[in-house]
């Protein structure tokens, strides 16, 4: 069964409710995605929370709608039309196909968005609900299927016909639901809206009588804010992954300090130590008169999480214990400066290492042991002048930075081929690596472009790539 | 009689001083890591490297600011301990596969590029604990920062290694005197043939280091020639001297102005 079809599919004649086999028979190369009602519901709830940017009361109306009670909020957006237009623009910007309707009652808005004119945005003027609903099919009243079938048998097709009929016989025949739904839609009865729960971000705010200027004062305030936030995090069983500290200055400007953590962090002391790392980045200007700490992203705290990576390895556990320190270092130096290095299957030395996150699961693979590798790698490799016999003799001497090194012992060559499967230009290239020792015992890692025989493999230039 | 009491006083004073220097404290298991090189272990007052403390390592004689031998020595010591390692650098030019050559697995090492705050990060890591050890690469360090590192390392019971990376044109005499527990200087020596029985076969034997202990609490300066860390991080006493002759049975420590 086709649960939903996008605009392109509908143009091909695929319709909701059609058997899947039939749809596939019409067009062989349809993209078919299994329906995921639970996932849809989760997504819809998240979207309903996002809609709180427009008005405080929003709720997901499963399976396919979101209600926003915009009473008193639309003027902030320059009127209802502007607000709907902004909503439509943002949602279509992320690739969502939406139909928006605004009316005096949630029932009417639902009816218009589902069964109204095929416009992306429908605006029902105040007091015009009855007029607008009159022409819509009775399905727009959100009725159970058996009621719809019954109404259909009795010849009702439009909402207007139900509105004009006598209420008592309808109530006798179909029960209270039909009339309730009708009253909800028309607004003769108020339909409550259950707002999305637990949608609020955790936040703590302090305002000051005297503007603050000193780092000590900021530290004290941050401690207080963290205590409040931690209390709420603990109640929810969550830890902060992202924090925003907003400092409001006297002159009305704001500074936002954002930081992230490697794992959900809950204890107040840890939170305030993280923020303390950034105190010096606060620019108080003429003074800060209010500070707000937001938990922009929270995640449940699960102590078992760490062991789950790799139960047999103690390394993961001990790395997990380092998380508070890692968070502080990341807050101070930035996420790119705190890392682990992991092996990559590559013969090209500079590609044999990749950076991974400090708390990434243990890779379980060691460095290749058999090959000698220098502790320092020069990036980029430094050109040197070397004297060597072709094709496969180690250099006798080389000159680097105007200093000449006479080579006493050498190990090699280790031939490294270009990775043509990664970069087309390397198809023919190769390098010959030598580990060499000079007269004083210093060890260097040199390579020559090419195999020394075929000029296509390289230009025979020598480079110093590392120091042992 | 007076002579005996003087001796008594002297030994009391010695005990008091070493107590102050925290040298006579109970040698808990795991506090000392023997090098496994008999003359070295015999010379050090703890019978090996005392782990809680700051150890300064510097390359000598190469004139290059890479501290490659010093880094390998620190890595070799840490490879023989258990637990994660923090490696703090000013700039990231460390080629990690080399750590595999001395037995330090990639999953154990956490890197931080800390620009000018290397000492501060090291100290914070020491105070946080839970590391096998902390390595920092510095161009310079203020004596007071080094003193703080030494105290933090003592308190944490963890080793901290300071790799000295001299700036160009700077005399390679190591850092200004700082409060490290031990200071080592590593100079390269020409290694022997890869196959001693067949000197003409090409190849590289283990690198040879001249290991100078230039300062150590409770021991005199001394020097040894050792083979560089093997695949498990162990040093070995070199059987060969630079000219290829066999070393005397015991390397004689010699005095230096330390």
Image (tube, coloured by chain):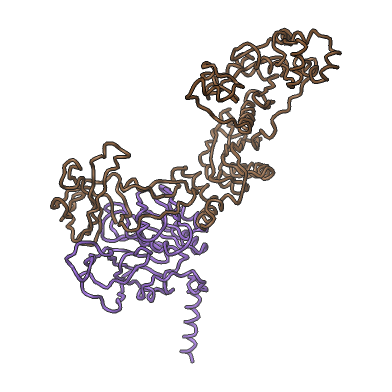
Quadrant of the image occupied by residue B37: bottom left
Q: How many marks?
A: 0
Which residue is outermost to the bottom?
B1
Which residue is outermost to the left?
A389
Q: Would you say A277 lies left or right of B168 here?
A: right
Q: Position of residue A422 (x, y in %)?
A: 33, 39
Quadrant where the C terminus of chain B is found in the figure: bottom left
**B97 in relation to B159, above or below:** above
Q: Position of residue A123 (x, y in %)?
A: 65, 12
Can residue A83 be seen from the camera position used here? no
Q: Would you say A271 lies left or right of A452 here?
A: right
Q: Position of residue A267 (x, y in %)?
A: 62, 48
**B105 in relation to A431, above or below:** below
**B61 in relation to B226, above or below:** above
Q: Residue placed at 55% from the left, 34% from the top?
A: A256
Q: Nearer the viewer, residue B245 or B140?
A: B245
Q: Nearer the viewer, residue A10 or B144?
A: A10
Q: Position of residue A425 (x, y in %)?
A: 26, 37
Q: Nearer the viewer, residue B243 or B23?
A: B243
Can residue B242 be seen from the camera position used here? yes
Quadrant of the image occupied by residue A42: top right
Q: Colour of chain A?
A: brown
Q: Nearer the viewer, residue A76 or A113?
A: A113
Q: Colour of chain B?
A: purple
């Amino acid at each position: 069964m086709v649960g939903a079809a996008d605009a392109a599919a509908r143009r091909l004649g695929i319709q909701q409710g059609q058997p899947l086999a039939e749809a596939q028979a019409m067009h062989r190369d349809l993209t078919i995605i299994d329906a995921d009602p639970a996932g849809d519901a989760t997504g819809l709830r998240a979207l309903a929370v996002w809609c709180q940017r427009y008005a405080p009361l929003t709720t997901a109306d499963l399976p396919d709608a979101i209600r926003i009670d915009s009473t008193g909020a639309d003027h902030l957006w320059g009127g209802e039309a502007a607000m709907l237009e902004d909503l439509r623009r943002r949602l279509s910007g992320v690739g969502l196909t939406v139909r928006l309707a605004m009316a005096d009652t949630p029932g009417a808005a639902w009816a218009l968005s589902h069964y109204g004119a095929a416009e992306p945005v429908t605006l029902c003027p105040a007091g015009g609900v009855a007029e607008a609903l009159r022409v819509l099919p009775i399905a727009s009243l959100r009725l159970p299927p058996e009621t719809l079938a019954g109404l259909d048998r009795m010849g009702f097709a439009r909402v207007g016909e139900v509105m004009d009929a006598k209420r008592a016989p309808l109530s006798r025949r179909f029960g209270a639901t039909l009339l309730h739904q009708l009253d909800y839609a028309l607004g003769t009865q108020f339909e409550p809206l259950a707002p999305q729960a637990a949608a609020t971000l955790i936040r703590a705010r302090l305002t000051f009588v005297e503007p603050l200027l000193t780092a000590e004062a900021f530290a004290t305030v941050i401690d207080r804010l963290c205590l409040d936030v931690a209390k709420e995090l603990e109640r929810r069983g969550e830890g902060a992954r992202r924090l925003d500290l907003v400092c409001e200055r006297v002159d009305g400007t704001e500074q936002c300090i954002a930081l992230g953590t490697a794992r959900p962090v809950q204890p107040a002391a840890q939170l305030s130590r993280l923020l303390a790392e950034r105190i010096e980045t606060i620019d108080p200007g003429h003074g800060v008169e209010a500070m707000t700490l937001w938990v922009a992203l929270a995640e449940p705290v699960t102590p078992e999480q760490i062991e789950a990576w790799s139960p047999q390895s103690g390394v993961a556990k001990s790395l997990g214990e380092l998380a508070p320190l890692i968070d502080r270092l990341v807050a101070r130096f930035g996420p790119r400066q705190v890392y682990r290095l992991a092996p990559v299957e590559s013969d090209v030395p500079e590609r044999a290492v990749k950076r991974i996150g400090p708390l990434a699961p243990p890779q379980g693979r060691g460095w290749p042991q058999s090959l000698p590798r220098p502790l320092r790698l020069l990036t980029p490799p430094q050109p040197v002048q070397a004297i060597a016999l072709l094709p496969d003799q180690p250099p006798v001497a080389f000159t680097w930075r105007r200093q000449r090194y006479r080579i006493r012992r050498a190990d090699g060559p280790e031939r490294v081929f270009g990775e043509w499967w990664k970069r087309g230009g390397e198809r023919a290239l190769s390098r010959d690596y030598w580990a060499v020792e000079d007269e004083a015992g210093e060890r260097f890692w040199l390579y020559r472009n090419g195999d020394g025989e075929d000029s296509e493999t390289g230009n025979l230039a020598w480079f110093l790539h590392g120091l042992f | 009689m007076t002579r005996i009491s003087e001796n008594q006083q002297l030994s009391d004073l010695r005990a008091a001083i070493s107590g102050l220097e925290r040298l006579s404290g109970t040698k808990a298991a795991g506090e000392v890591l023997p090098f496994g090189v008999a003359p070295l272990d015999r010379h050090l007052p703890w019978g090996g490297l005392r782990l809680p403390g700051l150890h300064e390592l510097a390359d000598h004689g190469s004139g290059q600011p890479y501290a490659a031998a010093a880094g390998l020595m620190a890595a070799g010591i840490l490879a023989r301990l258990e637990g994660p390692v923090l490696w703090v650098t000013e700039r990231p030019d460390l080629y990690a596969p080399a750590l595999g050559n001395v037995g330090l697995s990639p999953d154990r090492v956490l890197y931080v590029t800390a620009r000018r705050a290397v000492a501060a990060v090291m100290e914070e890591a020491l105070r946080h604990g839970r590391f096998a050890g902390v390595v920092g690469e510095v161009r310079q360090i203020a004596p007071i920062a080094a003193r703080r590192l030494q105290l933090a390392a003592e308190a944490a019971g963890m080793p901290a290694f300071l790799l000295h990376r001299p700036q160009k044109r700077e005399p390679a005499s190591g850092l200004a005197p700082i409060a490290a527990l031990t200071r080592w200087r590593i100079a390269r020596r020409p290694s022997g043939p890869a196959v001693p029985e067949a000197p003409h076969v090409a190849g590289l034997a283990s690198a040879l280091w001249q290991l100078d202990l230039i300062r150590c609490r409770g021991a005199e300066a001394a020097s040894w020639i050792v083979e560089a860390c093997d695949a498990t991080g162990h040093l070995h006493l070199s059987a060969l001297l630079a000219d290829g002759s066999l070393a005397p049975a015991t390397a004689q420590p010699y005095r230096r102005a330390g």
